[in-house]
């Protein structure tokens, strides 16, 4: 059976390595990026670059979008020169961006009128997971469409971490719940560790003990250790993007009449990091404004007065 022809729109920090893994798995790949230079590596690896999302759709059986936000998805799918203009019967659209669940449902409703089936399938794992082909993928939409796309997902994600989570929009709901926790937990790590340093404790000792105790968490063991403790704040995952995701969390909570005080407090801390120039740095830069408030730095190699 011939490999499905895959199209990919959005060749960024995540999209680039995802494309490379699709090529390694043998999928014929057609790509579009607003900045042609960002697609140079995947083109060199064997992808075909075209000049519009419409052209991607015309050349593909499955089109993946991996763009920044809800308006971007609407633009590349429904706008002039978009995916829908190049759609053909049997085309599948897989949006792997993190966007509003309501927008995912609206886009799916529009494309369905032209015979296009859609999954919303956001990912978790950051740039490291994208490079390693070890992303977690949470997909909403028809279960049969999900199964048809499973080989494509398995080129980018870990087999055991690829999930069908419900109808269209459900993938985005699950992703936003994850991002809610991601933002709150990283901010809590920052607050607690800064307090510990200010009170005289050693960073590495605290991290080791907490990792073996009830306060242990993935954020502390991975991005915090790699990026905050070293002071590099290399993305990773941009602070700007986490602010966008937490804004979507607050929007979803407002729609449902649910109070989210921890998310509301956390987003103000990430906005402070952004204002300090860390918008395009890793979200663990949430440590920076809190460190400045406390007059200490949480660093394994270099700690003390900031």
Image (spheres, rainbow, N blue to C red):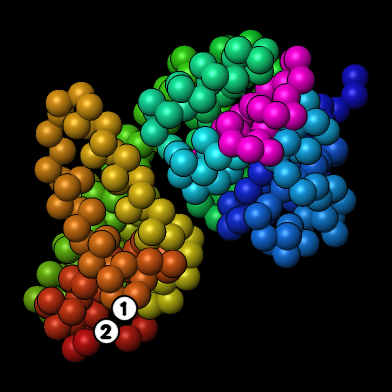
Distance (Cα) linking label 1 and label 2: 5 Å
Image quarter in which the C terminus is found: bottom left
Residue pushed farthest right? 1
Q: Residue furthest bottom?
A: 305
Do the residues under discs 1 and 2 have CB atoms within 8 angstroms?
yes
Secondary-structure class at tag 1? loop
Q: Is residue 23 magenta?
A: no
Quarter of the image where one finds residue 55? top right
Mark 1 lies on residue: 299
Of residues 228 and 177, the one nearer the viewer is 177
Horizontal side of residue 59 vs 115, given as left or right: right
Residue under numbered circle 2: 303
Q: Position of residue 173 (x, y in %)?
A: 37, 28
Which residue does the image show at 19% across and 32% down from the upper left?
Answer: 254
Q: Which region is colored magenta?
A: 77-97
Residue extending farthest to the front is 80
Q: Quadrant of the N terminus?
A: top right
Q: Which residue is at a point 47% across and 15% down the rendered structure image?
A: 167
Q: Is residue 154 visible?
A: no
Residue drawn at the location 38% of the way across and 66% of the way down: 279
Q: Is residue 78 magenta?
A: yes
Q: Where is residue 259? Give x, y as percent.
A: 12, 34
> Is residue 221 shown left or right of residue 47?
left
Q: Is residue 60 above or below residue 201?
A: above
């Amino acid at each position: 059976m011939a490999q499905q022809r895959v199209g990919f729109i959005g060749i960024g920090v995540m999209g680039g390595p995802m494309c490379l893994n699709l090529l390694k798995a043998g999928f014929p790949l057609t790509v579009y990026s607003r900045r042609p230079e960002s697609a140079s590596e995947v083109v060199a690896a064997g992808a075909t670059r075209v000049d519009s999302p419409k052209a991607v759709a015309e050349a593909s059986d499955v089109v993946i979008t991996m763009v920044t936000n809800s308006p971007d998805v609407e633009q590349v799918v429904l706008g002039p020169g978009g995916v829908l203009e190049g759609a053909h019967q049997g085309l599948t659209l897989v949006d792997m961006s993190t966007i509003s669940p309501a927008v995912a449902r609206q886009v799916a409703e529009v494309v369905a009128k032209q015979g296009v089936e859609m999954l919303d399938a956001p990912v978790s794992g950051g740039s490291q997971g994208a490079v390693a082909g070890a992303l977690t993928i949470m997909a909403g939409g028809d279960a049969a469409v999900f199964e048809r796309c499973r080989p494509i997902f398995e080129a980018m994600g870990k087999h055991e971490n690829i999930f069908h989570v419900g109808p269209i929009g459900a993938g985005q709901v699950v992703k936003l719940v994850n991002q809610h926790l991601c933002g709150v937990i990283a901010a809590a790590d920052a607050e607690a560790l800064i307090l510990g340093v200010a009170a005289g404790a050693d960073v590495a000792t605290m991290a080791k003990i907490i990792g073996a105790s009830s306060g242990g968490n993935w954020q502390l063991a991975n991005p915090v250790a790699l990026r905050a403790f070293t002071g590099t704040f290399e993305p990773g995952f941009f602070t700007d993007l986490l602010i966008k995701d937490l804004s979507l969390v607050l929007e979803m909570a407002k729609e449902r009449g649910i109070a989210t005080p921890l998310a509301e407090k956390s987003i103000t801390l990430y906005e402070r990091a952004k204002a300090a120039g860390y918008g395009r740095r890793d979200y663990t830069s949430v440590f920076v404004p809190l460190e400045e408030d406390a007059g200490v730095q949480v660093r394994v190699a270099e700690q003390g007065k900031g």
